[in-house]
Amino acid sequence: MSSTPLTLNLVEGSVSFSFSPQAALELKVAIDQLMQRLKTIAAKPAGGGGKVTPQPPLEYRHTGEVFLEIFCNPNIWPTPFAAKVLLTVRDVTIRLTTETELTRLIEDINQYLEQVG
């Protein structure tokens, strides 16, 4: 089955791989949930008066023609716009692990969904 490749822009360069629209929608849902957790943390009262409950990390995994893993601990970022994710893309011959900006990942997923939609 031929599909439109997903291109993720990194700090330096990009990576493209085969990815289904269904998998992209699942990833978008996972990222939307992460954004809500990040917003919860960012909304904590100033001055440390209130304690924010630690939020669970995003641990997304997809196995297709390539294995994609995305990890983000929302508890270490002050705002959603500062957040970065650890990204791993691998297959039997190559493995790429890097850090990328969450906002850039969101833009890439949205652009992909627009192309295939």
Image (cartoon, rainbow, N blue to C red):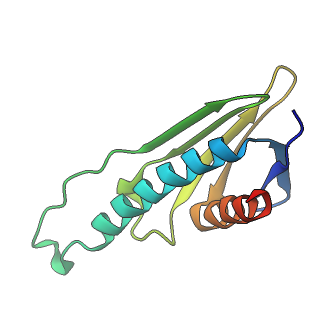
**Residue positioned 19% across, 60% down in the render:** 52
Q: Nearer the viewer, residue 21 or 83?
A: 21
Q: Percent x, y for residue 16?
A: 84, 48
**Residue positioned 19% across, 54% down in the render:** 53
Total labels drawn? 0
Relative placement, left or right, of 54 versus 57 is left
Relative placement, left or right, of 69 versus 30 is right
The residue positioned farthest toward the bottom in the image shown: 46
Q: Nearer the viewer, residue 45 or 92?
A: 92
Q: Quadrant of residue 49?
A: bottom left
Q: Percent x, y for residue 83?
A: 51, 63
Q: Nearer the viewer, residue 47 or 15?
A: 15
Q: Percent x, y for residue 22?
A: 64, 43
**Residue positioned 29% across, 50% down in the render:** 55
Relative placement, left or right, of 26 versus 110 is left
The residue positioned farthest toward the front in the image shown: 117
Quarter of the figure that contains the C terminus: bottom right
Relative placement, left or right, of 80 versus 42 is right
Q: Quadrant of residue 79?
A: bottom left
**Residue positioned 87% across, 22% down in the render:** 93
The residue positioned farthest toward the top in the image shown: 92
Quarter of the figure that contains the N terminus: top right
